[in-house]
Amino acid sequence: MEIMTESDQALLRRVVGGDTRALSAVMDRHAPAVNRYAWAITSRRMDVEEVVQDTFLTLWRRAETLAAVESLLPWLLVTCRNHALNLNRKNGRHLAEELDDDLAAPADPAEARDRLRFVMAEIDLLSETDRRVCELCLVEGRPYADVADAVGLSVGAVKQRVMRTRTRLRKAVIDDERR
């Protein structure tokens, strides 16, 4: 039987057996739809390419765990969606939130000190542990692992506290500037 006319079930059985030609046939058949779907849920070309590649790599690695299916397309689209959501979350963590132009740092040191008093007031409201984490990570720039050891927390807890503190401080500054 010609490989391109085989059913998805037959191709899946061959993929489970390690047949790269069968995987190639699945990709030829379903890559256009997976690619269109990836474009709908990611915004950059390199993200689309990564998500599509990861989708078919996941098929290759997990083929033996799939139940007999009539069509692989629904499974591929769900897998594509999951990879895209994970990538979007990962990319979102690395985006810097831009401040409005009117919130840029002032040239006058006295005005800068005046603005800073709102941040200092927010820092004073933090718990003792959060203040210490803020001081070590955000002021001194020490690595999370060092701070975790110094304050007796896990690295994950330190990261969470830093993220929460940054959000709180950013909100305090922006809210105050808009008053």
Image: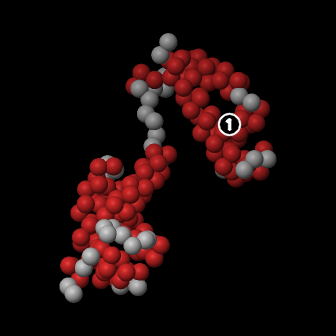
Where does residue 89 sit, x and y in percent of width and height?
47, 48
Residue sitting farthest toward the top? 179
Residue sitting farthest toward the bottom? 1
Give the left or right position of residue 46, taking residue 140 as reference: left
Task: Please tell me how many numbered marks the rendered image carries.
Answer: 1
- Sort mark 1 into few (<14), some (14-19) or many (20+) by Cα contacts within 10 Å: many
Q: State the colouring used for the structure image.
A: secondary structure
- Give the quarter of the image for residue 46: bottom left
- Give the quarter of the image for residue 97: top left
Give the left or right position of residue 93, taking residue 26 as reference: right
Please identify the quadrant where the N terminus is shown.
bottom left
Residue found 54% across the figure and 23% down from its top:
173
Relative depth, front residue between 87 and 147: 87
Where does residue 53 sit, x and y in percent of width and height?
36, 66
Question: To which residue does mark 1 refer?
Answer: 134
Q: Quick check: can you spot residue 120? A: no
Element at label 1: helix
Residue found 61% across the figure and 36% down from its top:
164
Q: Is residue 45 above or below residue 105?
A: below
Residue found 64% across the figure and 45% down from its top:
159
Relative depth, front residue between 26 and 116: 26
Where does residue 125 sit, x and y in percent of width and height?
70, 24
Residue found 31% across the figure and 79% down from its top:
11
